[in-house]
Amino acid sequence: MAFRNKQHLKNFLAYLKTIDQWNTGRTKDEIIADKGDEIRSLKEQNAELKEELKAARKLETEDFINIQEGYLLTVVDLAKKVQDTRNVDTFQE
């Protein structure tokens, strides 16, 4: 009977360790090392996201469309064709 109670208590303690939010079963050095690893990982992720943002911003433009001389009618024709295809798409729905 005593062995069975000890086993139940050990199982219960193992369960408590899995839900330990305050890290009561670990030393300060272990906690600091884990948090240091987490910070390092987050800094790497932050650097990657900054690079992705920088690449995405390169694709954006604040300039106007530069239409070379003599090609204005071509651009107008393309705009008209796009408009016509959008009108055809709305009629089909």
Image: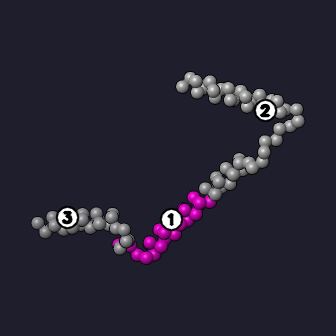
Q: Is residue 45 above or below residue 69?
A: below
Residue tagged by mark 2? 75
Q: Position of residue 38 (x, y in %)?
A: 50, 65
**Could you tell me how far apart the alpha carbons at marks 1 and 3 are, in whole angstroms?**
34 Å
- Nearer-the-camera pick, 36 or 22: 22
Residue 13 image position (x, y, % from top left): 26, 67
Q: Earlier in the sequence, mark 2 or mark 1?
A: 1
Query: Which residue appears at 21% of the width and 67% of the height?
Result: 9
Asked whether 27 or 81 is in front, the reply is 81
Q: Decide: few, some or many residues near mark 1? Use Cα within 10 Å; few <14, some 14-19, many ≥20.
A: few
Find residue 6 and report its image quarter.
bottom left
Give the residue type at disc 1.
Glu
In the picture, the disc for residue 8 is 3
Q: Nearer the viewer, mark 2 or mark 1?
A: 2
Q: Is 5 part of what is drawn in magenta? A: no
Quadrant of the rendered image containing residue 5: bottom left
Marks 2 and 1, how far apart at CA: 53 Å
Q: Is residue 26 magenta?
A: yes
Image quarter (top left, top right, bottom left or bottom right) of the N terminus: bottom left
Q: Which residues are magenta?
A: 25-47
The percent position of residue 20, horizontal first and vertical second, equals 34, 67
Of marks 3 and 2, which one's residue comes earlier in the chain?
A: 3
Badge nearest the viewer, 1 or 3: 1
Vertical arrangement, residue 67 with respect to residue 28, above or below: above
Q: Nearer the viewer, residue 35 or 72?
A: 72
Is residue 75 rendered to the left or right of residue 17?
right
Q: Which residue is mark 1?
A: 38
Specify whether 57 is left or right of 40.
Answer: right
* Circle 3: element type: helix
